[in-house]
Image (cartoon, rainbow, N blue to C red):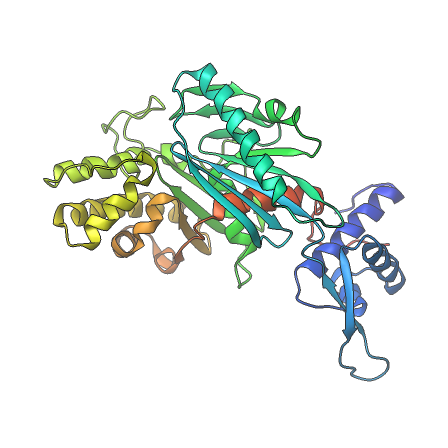
Amino acid sequence: MTINVDAAEMRRINLATVLGVIRGKRTTSRIDISQITGLNKATVSYLVDELIQEQLVQEIGYGSSSGGRKPVLLKFNANAAYAIGIDIQITHMTTVVSNTRGEVLYRQTKPLALDGRTSLYQERLVDLILVEVAAAMKATPPSPHGLAGIGVALPGIVNFSAGTVYYLPNASVSDWNLQAALGQHFEVPVFIDNDANCGAWCEFQHRNSRVQNLVHINAGVGVGAGVIVNGQLYRGKDGLAGEFGHMTIAALGRECSCGNYGCWEEYASERSLLRYIRESGGEKPGTASEWSIVEQILYEAQHDNRAYIRAFHTLGEYLGVGIANILNGLNPEQVTIGGMLSRAATFILPEIERVLQHRAILLNKSTSLSIANANAVAIGAAEIVIDQTLFSYPKQGSFDS
């Protein structure tokens, strides 16, 4: 396919392509980059020199020679810029500062106790974000490119392109341009995305293997999924992709906050866990802070409280039902599970795997399943900032000089 672009645009695309190659390797050389991208050696050399001048790339010595001069080794400068990532859940907020490789330098988690009324919720949430960003900015080290931006992840339906929150089902918030509300307070760009998308992007970026198709399940107060297809986040036409928490798994099932009946979220979330505890003859644990209730339940299960163990097993079974549907529909290489409920992996993973053996078809039964980084959503929010600022052009394909 031929892409018609002017010379300036082509240079920017090539520059981002070269930077992407260097970023993806521990070390490389100008010759290697030329072979990988198809760009001629002179173009690569010119672009690398520009990246060195911008302090995005460093020369670190010489590599071994297979004949002729030794190649100069290049390394991506991971500390050339930083980004702030914020994971906002119904009960708590996690803020991180990471460098361009997603390595965390600062992390802060705080409980949220916000008024459920829409206007007050929105106003108070913005105030809290401003406070947390101010603290994160103080913790951000100096760097050649400074703070690249701020990424905010939300547990709801979000239009990434517009920076708009369509709907936060557990907070009664809808049609809110959070990007505009925050943007007026900062000189750096602000990006708004769904929490599962951010978790998926983090897990994709940090896979040791070359996984190109991945689904990340974020299970907590609600359930959502982020989908990576051919190395790219798939958000859908209007940013609605991945709302698997609202797929129907019981046609005449429980009513969901979205207005539908029998949604997966009603059977595989924190509130369903509390229901399973009651059904197993147990009681909701007493806790001073609602955001840590999963840890309280997990503590009881680890100390052989049978009602709590049975509740986790039931939760794992229903998580497995939904994941099997996703596997049979998308056939990814990897599924990762994050969110507060992933902390109960000891109890839920065996049940998920058991259900997949019965409900997933053919090779989907052997799809790799793992627990995500505990801070995947916040880190992913920061990494999306870096991707949208320093790496804003596709890294696939070759380009002619």
Q: Is residue 194 above or below residue 256?
A: below
**Which part of the image, by quadrant, shows the C terminus?**
bottom right
Quadrant of the rendered image containing residue 248: top left
Q: Residue at x 41, y 31 (%)?
A: 112
Q: Residue at x 58, y 41 (%)?
A: 136
Q: Percent from the top left, x then y, of residue 399?
A: 79, 53
- Seen from the viewer's position, the closer of residues 6 and 135 is 135
- Seen from the viewer's position, the closer of residues 378 and 18 is 378
Q: Can residue 223 be seen by looking at this rendering?
A: yes
Q: Residue at x 86, y 64 (%)?
A: 41
Q: Percent from the top left, x then y, of residue 24?
A: 65, 60
Q: Is residue 212 above or below residue 25?
A: above
Q: Percent from the top left, x then y, of residue 14?
A: 80, 51
Horizontal arrangement in the rendering, residue 82 relative to residue 120 (left or right): right
Q: Percent from the top left, x then y, of residue 167?
A: 46, 24
Quadrant of the rendered image containing residue 184: top right
